[in-house]
């Protein structure tokens, strides 16, 4: 399973990237043979304004099923990743 983490409008950090990869591997471990790629985009919607503006977009692809996309918004990048990946 290939996991691609991309950042848009938010500072890329190794800690957040590792958190995303760890959560994806944990949540999708039972589907590891069926999932070929996961693309995660984490971004800041409002920029410096603050508020509920962290977006996590997850796209899961595999040969045996249609692409699945999930998107969540939150005030913290880590919790937003947890919500999106948990769904």
Image (spheres, grey):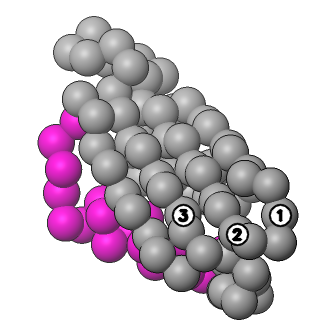
For the point 34% across and 14% down, the residue is 46
Q: Is residue 69 left or right of residue 26?
A: right
Mark 2 packing: few (<14 Cα in 10 Å), some, or many (20+)?
A: some
Q: Main secondary structure of the magenta part?
A: helix
The answer to whether mark 1 and mark 2 are in CB contact below 8 A is yes
Please give the residue where the numbered disc 2 appears in the rendered image. Answer: 62
On the rendered image, what quadrant is the N terminus found in? bottom right
- x and y, in percent, of residue 50 in the image: 32, 17
The answer to whether mark 3 and mark 1 are in CB contact below 8 A is no
Q: Which residues are magenta?
A: 10-27
Residue 65 is marked as 1
Would residue 40 be seen by someone viewing this image from the given angle?
yes
Residue 47 is marked as none
For the point 55% across and 31% down, the residue is 73
Please give the residue where the numbered disc 3 appears in the rendered image. Answer: 38
Of mark 3 and mark 2, the one earlier in the sequence is 3
Q: Look at the numbered disc 2 and give the secondary structure of its residue.
A: strand
């Amino acid at each position: 399973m290939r996991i691609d983490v991309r950042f848009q409008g938010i500072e890329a950090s190794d800690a957040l990237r590792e958190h995303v990869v760890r959560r994806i591997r944990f949540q999708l471990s039972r589907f590891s043979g069926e999932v070929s790629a996961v693309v995660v985009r984490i971004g800041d919607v409002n920029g410096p304004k603050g508020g509920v503006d962290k977006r996590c977009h997850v796209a899961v692809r595999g040969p045996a099923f249609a692409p699945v996309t999930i998107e969540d918004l939150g005030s913290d990048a880590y919790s937003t990743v947890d919500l999106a990946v948990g769904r």
